[in-house]
């Protein structure tokens, strides 16, 4: 009995330590949106509210990024760009309190579609410039990750994927103190498709992210309707909890409860 109790307690302590040691044990989520609501009712992102209560603003020019199930993952809604010939330039932005120090974690899932680098961009900006990321487009030799904007030293990794992916996950970690950006990608349909899962980019001094913009420009060459979409967006100063940490904690809690019930019996 003592051995079982000791093992149970150890599981609980390990779980607690893993969670507390994780950067996700506290912090602020700046933007979180699964794009499952469309308050404006017009199929456009502008005017909709994020899951944590912010409002997507109307575009300064062009038309709003769209919302619908064909842009999301697994049949759920996402935010995307339609046919350039029909909609022209598309963009929608959400603002949050600017961050000047520490780390900012930007994560999302992305339906890739076709087109060229610089077409459908995920843009984190504020202060000295913007970090614009384009991932995995189908242009010849461009199944990779491209960065541009004043916040980063422009960089283009063209050999991140062995073949054109359809759905990917992206995690970009901005270390504002070390002036470093690490981007990690995964092919959600074929994990083995990723040749370079993680790579680093240099940030320029003065970058203070305070807004996130989805942008599709007129030079995209994306003439396929519903060709791009982003889903499950999260911008925070902490990472998402590791599943293993949560599992250990849950297992420890269940075991402790079972031990207590046996003693009471």
Image: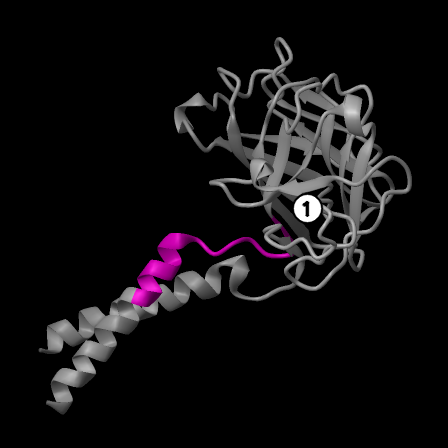
Judge whether 159 appears above or below 209 on screen.
above
Instruction: Examine the structure image and report whether residue 185 is included in the region drawn in magenta.
Output: no
Q: Residue at x 72, y 25 (%)?
A: 83
Residue 37 visible, this orientation: yes
Furthest toward the bottom, the residue is 264
Q: Nearer the viewer, residue 224 or 237?
A: 224
91 vs 36, left or right, is right
Name the quadrant containing residue 92: top right
Furthest toward the top, the residue is 140
Judge whether 61 appears above or below 157 on screen.
below
Q: How is the image coloured?
A: one colour
On the image, the x and y values in percent for residue 49 come to: 71, 58
Q: Residue at x 70, y 17 (%)?
A: 116
Q: Nearer the viewer, residue 152 or 168?
A: 168
On the image, the x and y values in percent for residue 16 come to: 39, 68
SS at circle 1: strand
Furthest toward the front, the residue is 42
On the image, the x and y values in percent for residue 128 come to: 87, 42
Q: Nearer the viewer, residue 149 or 56?
A: 56
17 vs 23, left or right, is left
Residue 154 visible, this orientation: no
Residue annotated with mark 1: 175
Q: Specify the quadrant that holds the N terminus.
A: bottom left
Query: Which stretch did the figure color magenta?
Result: 233-250
């Amino acid at each position: 009995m003592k051995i079982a109790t000791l093992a149970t307690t150890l599981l609980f302590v390990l779980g607690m330590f893993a969670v507390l040691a994780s950067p996700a044990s506290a912090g602020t989520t700046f933007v979180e949106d699964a794009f499952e609501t469309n308050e404006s009712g017009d199929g456009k992102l502008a005017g909709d509210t994020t899951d944590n209560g912010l409002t997507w603003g109307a575009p300064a020019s062009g038309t709003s990024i769209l919302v619908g199930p064909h842009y999301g993952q697994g049949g759920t809604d996402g935010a995307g760009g339609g046919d350039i010939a029909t909609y022209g330039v598309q963009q929608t932005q959400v603002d949050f309190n600017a961050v000047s120090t520490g780390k900012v974690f930007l994560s999302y899932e992305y339906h890739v579609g076709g087109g060229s680098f610089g077409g459908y961009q995920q843009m984190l900006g504020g202060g000295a410039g913007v970090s614009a990321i384009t991932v995995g487009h189908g242009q010849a030799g461009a199944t990779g990750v491209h960065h541009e904007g004043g916040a980063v030293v422009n960089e283009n990794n063209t050999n991140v994927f062995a073949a054109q992916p359809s759905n990917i996950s992206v995690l970009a970690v901005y270390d504002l103190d070390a002036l470093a950006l690490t981007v990690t990608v995964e092919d959600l349909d074929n994990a083995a498709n990723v040749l370079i899962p993680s790579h680093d980019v240099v940030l320029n001094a003065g970058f203070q992210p305070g807004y996130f913009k989805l942008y599709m420009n007129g030079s995209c060459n994306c003439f396929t309707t519903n060709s791009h979409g982003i889903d499950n967006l999260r911008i925070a100063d902490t990472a998402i909890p590791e599943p293993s940490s949560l599992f250990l904690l849950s297992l420890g809690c269940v075991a402790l409860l079972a031990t207590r019930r046996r003693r009471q019996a």
